[in-house]
Amino acid sequence: MSRRLLVAIVVAVVAVVAPSGSTASADEPAWASGVSDARKQRARTLLDAGNALFVDNNYAEALATYRDALVAWDHPAIRFNVVRCLILLERPLEAWDNLELALRYGAEPLEPAVYEEAVSFRKQLAKQIGRIEITCEQVGVKLVLDGAPLATCPAREARRLLPGPHAVVGSLAGYLTKSLEVIVVGGDRATAEISLVRLSDAARVTRRWPTWIPWVVAGTGAGVAALGGLVEIKAHSDENLYERSVARDCSTMACPVDPIVARLHDSAVSENRLGIAAMSIGLAALATGSVMLYLNRAHLDYDVSASSAMVRLRVAM
């Protein structure tokens, strides 16, 4: 837009909102009803200042000045200048809200060219913004949209959103929190319904292994260790018998050991080794089974498919 055209536009707007006289007319339009000449004059002064900033591309400062003018007089033409600034500042949601206010009286308060521009802006913004309606019937459910609290259910909430992903969350004590990912495409409208599932209905008991496996491992380990202990007792018994036999038969001098007695010693040595090995393996298995029993404690898992979903809003072709 050229500087000359900008000047022409703002001059036209000034003409629209300029005070027409010192006293209020009985047939004043709705947008001027109850506004004193002093307030109109202040609005015009601020509008002139805002227009100067706008022409110099100081859109943020112009926006602030136009908003000050609206405090004095909420004229549709001033409101439309706010829309222009917001569009240039890439704030389409705010621009839409202000454009609806600028057009609430139709074409009458605006210059024909300005009204046509406003209608054109509405069409452009409608393609850039999506709309979602969120419904919830469960009493007490709290709704949150992109981290901002909405209503407490039962409720129906409608919001305009910028294109992209948005999160709708419903929560209530004793229920599984539900999150909907809403991917908005400009120009479309859809509905999202929040319905929560009780924690007791969504929960299920799970374990790492079937219940019997840790018990079998621990039990087998205990059995092997006990068997090893018995073998070890037998080894000590044979060793004691061997020593008593040797002490009885060879009490005063060295003598050849009876082969049967000698086999007691060999048997005791073998049984001792076997008993120690069996007890070691058994105790290790028992310890493993005990750890498995601990790790296999019951856990509550929840069906997360009931807590999240995705809604895609697409442009109707």
Image (cartoon, rainbow, N blue to C red):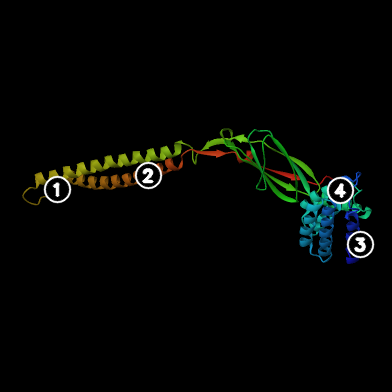
Residue behind mark 4: 32
Callout 2 amino acid:
Ala
Distance CA(mark 1)–CA(mark 2): 43 Å
User: The residue under label 4 is which amino acid type?
Assistant: Ala
Nearest the eye: 56 or 285: 56
Residue positioned 94% across, 53% down in the render: 112
Q: Amino acid at mark 1?
A: Val
The mark nearer the N terminus, 2 or 3, is: 3
Which one is closest to the eye, mark 3 or mark 1? 3
Say which of 232 and 161 sits in front.
Answer: 161
Tag in front: 4 or 2: 4
Quadrant of the image for the N terminus? Answer: bottom right
Name the residue: 31% across, 39% down: 226
Q: Mark 4: few, some, or many residues within 10 Å (few <14, many ≥20)?
A: some
Q: CA distance from mark 4 to mark 2?
A: 88 Å
Residue 261 falls in which quadrant of the image? top left
Any mark on residue 257, and which?
1
The residue at the point 41 percent across, 40 percent down is 217
Q: Quadrant of residue 302?
A: top right
Residue 232 x/y as whole percent: 26, 43
Position in image of residue 317 (x %, y %): 85, 46
Near mark 2 (Cα within 10 A), the count class, few <14, some 14-19 or many ≥20, is: some
The mark nearer the N terminus, 4 or 2, is 4
Q: Is residue 89 visible?
A: no
Q: Are marks 3 and 4 in contact (CB under 8 Å)?
A: no
Query: Which residue position holds label 2?
Result: 287
Q: Position of residue 10 (x, y in %)?
A: 88, 60
| Residue that badge 3 annotates | 8
Q: Is label 3 in a helix, a strand or a loop?
A: helix
Residue shown at 83% from the left, 54% from the top: 38
Q: Residues within 10 Å of mark 3 (few under 14, many from 20)?
A: few
Of the image marks 1 and 2, the number of the one nearer the N terminus: 1
